[in-house]
């Protein structure tokens, strides 16, 4: 039976450590400030942003929520970002994705000052990540590497298979795990929707990371016995026995896969809380660098 990679417990520990550092430093300095931009009333986006704001409060960071209806124009949103870029009391800016279809997300992300891009989505940060330079690493991939590091999962020389090549999860994870470092030094295979015979690859994985957005996609037969399985997926599936009418499930068939994996992340309580801890880490980093 697999051991749990407990993202909830680790994120609480990391967040408490950052909170102590902020309490010590912000006696002389102002507290770090995260500005969150939320457009429209997409329920999961609202829940993610509220969680991020709540965690800021918990660690002693200031936060501001800039919430607009989905008919905001691209020009108005660009003006808001420009204002936050110029505001010396703002350390980090995050724009919750997805944005409404009339807004060009690429243009919005590129408008954020790279030194305030705590989500690490700006091309300059992604480019620095690819080159192995210091940068803001996107929160979910950073959270995954924090989990591997904390649980002392050996990555060097291992075959890591990543399912999903999105710009915010799969692609940056492939850079992180292939780099010459620790965690890192994996041989990485990046699979996507055009990959033929995906099980051929997943069966070879010492470390298997699922980030597709398809509930229970990874079945027991697809996993090599003893593999480390990381489930990034967060999917809402109908469950009328729940008050909300749905429950959250990952991209991995947890019940079956836990029998043969060596380590596994639960959903919820795995990568999700680590993403928030990593965002808090990035905001702390942005603040520390601005205050130097
Ligand atoms: N835990 C967290 O904090 C966190 C953070 C972010 C996202 N997530 C979750 O992670 C999941 C992925 O998110 P995302 O934003 O990366 O998704 P995304 O942008 O939709 O990307 C999905 C990726 O999966 C690939 N894919 C889709 N169907 C496939 C199939 N049948 N076989 C192989 N590959 C397939 C796609 O391939 P193509 O490129 O070929 O289309 C794409 O690269 C979602 O459940 C999301 O909610 C969780």
Image (cartoon, rainbow, N blue to C red):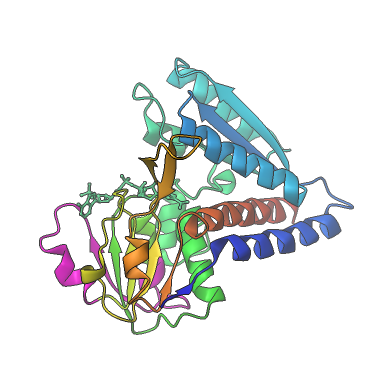
Q: Position of residue 284 (x, y in %)?
A: 68, 54
Q: Quadrant of the C terminus?
A: bottom right
Give left or right: position of 179 versus 143.
Answer: left
Q: Residue furthest right?
A: 27
Q: How many marks?
A: 0
Residue 235 shows up from this direction: yes
Q: Residue furthest left?
A: 196
Picture residue at 32% right of the left edge, 67% below the top = 256
Q: Which residues lie in the magenta part?
A: 176-204
Image vertical order of residue 167 relative to residue 72, above or below: below
Whether 195 is among the magenta residues is yes
Quarter of the figure with residue 9: bottom right
Image vertical order of residue 32 relative to residue 108, above or below: below
In this view, the residue in front, 148 or 239, is 239
Q: Residue furthest front?
A: 241
Picture residue at 31% right of the left edge, 78% below the top = 206
Picture residue at 53% right of the left edge, 77% below the top = 151
């Amino acid at each position: 039976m697999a051991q749990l990679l407990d993202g909830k417990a680790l994120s609480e520990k990391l967040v408490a450590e950052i909170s102590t550092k902020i309490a010590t430093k912000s006696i002389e300095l102002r507290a770090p400030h995260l500005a969150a931009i939320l457009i429209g009333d997409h329920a999961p986006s609202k829940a993610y942003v509220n969680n991020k704001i709540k965690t800021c409060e918990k660690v002693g960071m200031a936060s501001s929520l800039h919430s607009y209806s989905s008919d905001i124009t691209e020009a108005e949103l660009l003006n808001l970002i420009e204002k936050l870029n110029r505001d010396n009391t703002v350390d980090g800016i995050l724009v919750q994705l997805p944005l409404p279809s009339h807004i060009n997300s690429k243009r919005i992300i590129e408008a954020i000052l790279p030194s305030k891009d705590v989500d690490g989505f700006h091309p300059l940060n992604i480019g620095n990540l690819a080159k192995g330079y210091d940068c803001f690493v996107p929160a979910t991939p950073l959270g995954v590497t924090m989990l591997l590091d904390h649980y002392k999962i050996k990555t060097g020389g291992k075959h890591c298979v990543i399912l999903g090549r999105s710009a915010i999860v799969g692609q940056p994870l492939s850079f992180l795990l292939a780099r010459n470092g620790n965690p890192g030094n994996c041989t990485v295979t990046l699979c996507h929707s055009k990959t033929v015979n995906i099980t051929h690859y997943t069966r070879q994985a010492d470390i298997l990371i699922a980030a597709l957005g398809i509930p229970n996609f990874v079945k027991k037969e697809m996993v090599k016995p003893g593999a480390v399985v990381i489930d990034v997926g967060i999917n809402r599936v109908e469950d009328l026995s729940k008050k909300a009418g749905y429950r959250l499930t990952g991209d991995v068939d947890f019940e079956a896969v836990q029998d043969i994996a060596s380590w596994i992340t639960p959903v919820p309580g795995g990568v999700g809380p680590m993403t928030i801890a990593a965002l808090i880490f990035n905001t702390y980093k942005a603040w520390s660098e601005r205050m130097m």
